[in-house]
């Protein structure tokens, strides 16, 4: 038995540095999804169309199918450069940018990112998640935290992104845990909540001493046989603590929403809760999809 | 014409994670040197003797030649584990540890490292540089800064290492400059003294905001076309500034000696000088050799 064929009204695409995820949309809902590791990092400018078709071809009908994509696909090294819009502005302030496709069945649109002139900052992809969150929570006024490789904190008010700041915490963690001398000391998985909490408090109370604490993990393992699980929780606590210390103007006394996959979001929620905040949580993929639905309304089909 | 043969009285060896450097010593001076990339990271426990012989065999006489080595060769993954001695103590408090060699012409000794129980810390190799510095400056009382992959700050008084602290600044710099998103923004060489100084002052005045500043380098390059040379100087300034902020109890109001190769030491000397300190400088290789000479006096030959 073959599956009944799926024909999409349009296609939503989350296209980041390391992945491509697509949803077939019909009657306002996603009826199928697919993903691959064909992120921007793996593709040359000419390779985007083939990578997209590989996933979505089964969903294409006879006519033209709109594809609305967000993320690094709109970077200078992406399919088409979708220039940043300066905040303050709504998360989707302009019409997506049309990308050229050879296949006549495709009409591809790319969502532009946001920029902030001072302090300089940029985002691509997170604006769509923010738009999705605001579509579902139109009266939200506060701060959105989007943990990831480059975690973003965005101040949102009256439907606009007022300001935002990026932190390299995710990339720092991966780099130290996998490629530095701490790789002997930080287990690839596992967790120790008490160690995380101690390290978090330590970093938050004396963030200026972060640089002095990192090598201590290695020495502690050598001298006191601390476990790799403790090492992992401690490194995470130190780095997230340092981030929270520097991001304090964003979250202190604010309503915070944490948008992320649960494994990435959980330590942020724990950390904020320990600081007396009561963050709400939202799933990153669901917010991206909701944001792409909002972006789709902005294009001329 | 062949060179006249060199026969060493003994051999000094600096054996780190990524390199092996040896000196043929005769009548209290070095008469030849050689080096290779056969550091601890490349060698299994059985491979050390062959890596050593590859460099020193031309210098061996008919009898037994002592070899005195310092560095990671004495780690648990090294040729022989040379257990740490706890500070406070002199930099070379115990007799080097004998490593087993199959070749009867070799008598190999490995200098033990130092440890500190609280806060936990360890060093291997730097104790020998400190011993060399103290052999040449026996009345030194103050702080030694040894910049490198894992920079060490050591408080030295009355010939003893009183306490010390390690910082992963060198490894963090390399990791961020080569493997993170900042690789697009940080040139592999070049320098901008003004940018370095600004970033240093910035990090020293608000070290708690380091985590917020790193991604700014990338955004600044994207939005304002800052150069890779500026990116390099800025990243160095931010990380060394954060280190100096955390190491302030070590250097503030102290006589500081910076021991390092000139390229690595220079930004530390600049940074300390900008803070009103007047550091003295010493060459790392010369200090290592002088320390190995001191260690050689401690063995029974």
Image: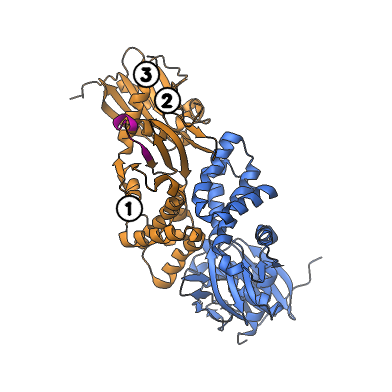
Chain colours: A blue, B orange
Residue A195 is situated, as x and y percent measured from the top left of the image, at: 65, 47
Between circles 1 and 3, the one closer to the viewer is: 1
**Residue receiving disc 2:** B50
The tag on residue A212 is: none
Q: Is residue A219 left or right of residue B231?
A: right
Q: Earlier in the sequence, mark 2 or mark 1?
A: 2
The quadrant of the image that shows the C terminus of chain B is top left
**Residue receiving disc 1:** B276
Q: Determine crowd level at label 2: few under 14, some 14-19, many 20+ residues with C-alpha closer than 10 A.
A: some
**Residue receiving disc 3:** B66
Between circles 3 and 2, the one closer to the viewer is: 3
Q: Is residue B54 left or right of residue A59?
A: left
Q: Is residue A214 left or right of residue B26?
A: right
Between circles 2 and 1, the one closer to the viewer is: 1
| Number of numbered markers | 3
Mark pair 2, 1: CA separation: 49 Å
The segment highlighted magenta reads B134-143
Marks 3 & 2 on one chain: yes
The residue shown at (57%, 34%) is A223
Residue A88 is situated, as x and y percent measured from the top left of the image, at: 53, 80
Marks 2 and 3: in contact by CB < 8 Å? no
Mark pair 3, 2: CA separation: 16 Å
In this rendering, the answer to whether B219 lies above or below B20 is: below
Q: Nearer the viewer, residue A203 or B113?
A: A203
Q: Is residue B22 visible?
A: no
The residue shown at (52%, 67%) is A47
């Amino acid at each position: 038995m073959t599956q009944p064929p799926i024909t999409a009204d349009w296609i939503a695409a989350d296209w980041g540095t390391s992945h491509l995820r697509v949803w077939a949309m019909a009657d306002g809902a996603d009826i199928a999804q697919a993903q691959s590791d064909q992120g921007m990092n793996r593709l040359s400018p000419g390779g985007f169309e083939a990578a997209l078709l590989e996933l979505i071809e089964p969903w294409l009908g006879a006519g033209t199918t709109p594809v609305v994509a967000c993320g690094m696909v709109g970077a200078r090294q992406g399919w088409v450069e979708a220039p940043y819009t300066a905040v303050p502005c709504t998360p989707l302030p302009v019409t997506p940018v049309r990308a050229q496709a050879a296949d006549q069945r495709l009409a591809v649109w790319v969502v532009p990112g946001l920029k902030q002139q001072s302090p300089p900052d940029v985002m691509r992809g997170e604006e769509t998640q923010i738009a999705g969150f605001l579509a579902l929570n139109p009266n939200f006024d506060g701060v959105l935290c989007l943990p990831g490789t480059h975690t973003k904190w965005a101040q949102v008010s009256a439907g606009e992104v007022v300001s935002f700041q990026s932190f390299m915490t995710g990339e720092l963690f991966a780099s130290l845990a996998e490629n530095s001398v701490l790789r002997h000391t930080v287990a690839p998985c596992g967790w120790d909540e008490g160690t995380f909490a101690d390290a978090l408090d330590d970093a938050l109370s004396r963030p200026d001493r972060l640089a002095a604490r990192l090598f201590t993990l290695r020495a502690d393992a050598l001298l006191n046989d601390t476990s790799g699980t403790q090492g992992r929780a401690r490194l995470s606590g130190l780095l997230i603590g340092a981030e929270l210390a520097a991001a304090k103007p964003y979250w202190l006394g604010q309503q915070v929403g944490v948008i992320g996959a649960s494994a990435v979001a959980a330590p942020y929620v724990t950390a904020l809760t320990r600081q007396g905040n009561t963050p709400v949580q939202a799933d990153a993929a669901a917010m991206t999809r909701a944001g792409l639905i909002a972006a789709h309304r902005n294009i001329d089909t």
